[in-house]
Image: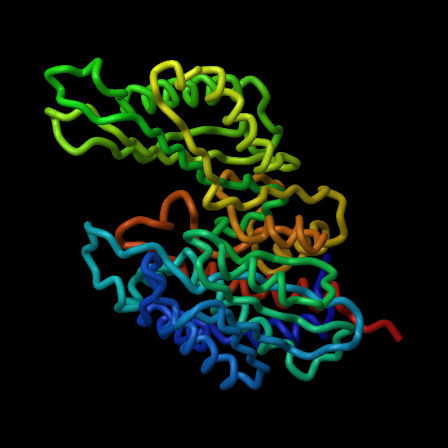
Amino acid sequence: MSLSPAEQKVLDRIDEDLLVRITQDLLRSPGQNPPGEEAATVAVLAAAAQELGLDVRRSPVELGRENVAVTLAGGNNPGLLLLGHTDVVPVGDGWTVDPYSGLLHDGRLYGRGASDMKGGLAAALVAMAALRDIPLAGPVELAALIDEEETGKGIRAYISENDRRYIGCITAEPTDLQTIIAARGDSYLQVSVHGRASHAGNPDGGANAIYGAAAVVAEIEHLHQELAATPHPLLGPATWSVGQINGGTGGSIVPADCVLVADRRLLPGESPAEVLADLGRRVAALRLEDRGLTVELAMPMEMPAFETAEDAPLVQITETARRDAGGEPMPLAGWTAACDGGYVARDLGVPVVVLGPGSVTTQAHRADESVAVAELVTAARTYALTALRLLAVHE
């Protein structure tokens, strides 16, 4: 599809220098989560949006942590939601550059969050600025939310307070600029096993909670193997992974308590509540009470999966815009990571795609994280062109 003169005019407003500057400013502001340091990033983002003449609304979620909604006004029809998050994972070890430098080197910007996802936030802002003074049938909103990397407090608060209507949502997470139409969800399950302590010289006098937890771990491994038999065509199978276990107080004491945490990736249509209930049934079948043990199950975090039909208008318009904006030919795809877009699809009933600069597989959550400036420009052009085509005013 060729660009109209009006579309070309909007794309010509995408300012690479501005895009680099905003990304660098965001990278130089801390936002590690845990412990939830988004405040500095929120301040930089809000200031940049106001400088660009966009409306900014900040909403407290908890003490010192605010969601930000940046809006470009339009008509009264449903608008386009651009979705992102202001938190990043902890910096970690192994960096060869300053993770807060925003270093520009050989066409790439370096820093924690460059790909995941401060580059995407900057691209969204610059795209919205390029659309100023363009008649739109509905608004364009960037929701930049806290706590995506942990338990999703930001997206849940945003949805609970939101009464706006949207024609679609683009989540600006790093996808190597590929249009993602399905993403797995995620949940954390905590299993607490309680037994009875005794001297290790008389282990039968106690009830070993670690032994009980080991039985649960083995059952979870069996569950993971069972799920491999029913893969999703774009996302592969749902998965289980035990990532943490902690129990006991010393080698000479039969442990009275043991807690394990498992990650369960979800497929579209799966109910987190049913996943929890199914694990409960499996654990009950182990009859750990016969060993003098009790078990408690909890799901401290759940993030739903989503899938958008390939022929949905949002998908077709976004994908065409991506190619017209300079994106490489790539098929529509699924994404094995999870994101806040699943909440938008499930709770607001809005079609969702994920598309953003950077790579979740080679850059996100790694030392020396970076993003290509060329990808930032293409992302901003894609967002602007998609909004223009979705929200065109028809006379």
The quarter in which the C terminus is drawn is bottom right
**Going by the image, does 234 lie left or right of 286?**
right
In the displayed structure, 229 sits above or below 187; it is above
Horizontal and vertical percent position of residue 301:
48, 46
The quarter in which the N terminus is drawn is bottom right
Horizontal and vertical percent position of residue 235:
56, 33
Foreground: 29 or 137? 29
Horizontal and vertical percent position of residue 362:
37, 45
In the displayed structure, 367 sits above or below 249; it is below
Residue at the right extreme of this rendering: 395
Q: For residue 252, what is the image quadrant? A: top left
| Residue at 76%, 44% in the rendered image | 311
Residue at the front extreme of this rendering: 205
Foreground: 138 or 256? 256
- Total number of numbered discs in the rendering: 0
**Going by the image, does 363 lie left or right of 158?**
left
| Residue at 69%, 44% in the rendered image | 308
The image's colour scheme reads: rainbow
In the displayed structure, 101 sits above or below 300; it is below
| Residue at 61%, 57% in the rendered image | 170
Foreground: 4 or 365? 365
Q: For residue 116, what is the image quadrant? A: bottom left
Task: Using the rendered image of the protein, determine whether residue 174 is visible from the camera's viewpoint.
Answer: yes
Q: For residue 288, what is the image quadrant? A: top left
| Residue at 58%, 69% in the rendered image | 142
Task: Using the rendered image of the protein, determine whether residue 319 is visible from the camera's viewpoint.
Answer: no
**Going by the image, does 3 lie left or right of 252?**
right
Horizontal and vertical percent position of residue 117:
44, 59
In the displayed structure, 96 sits above or below 300; it is below
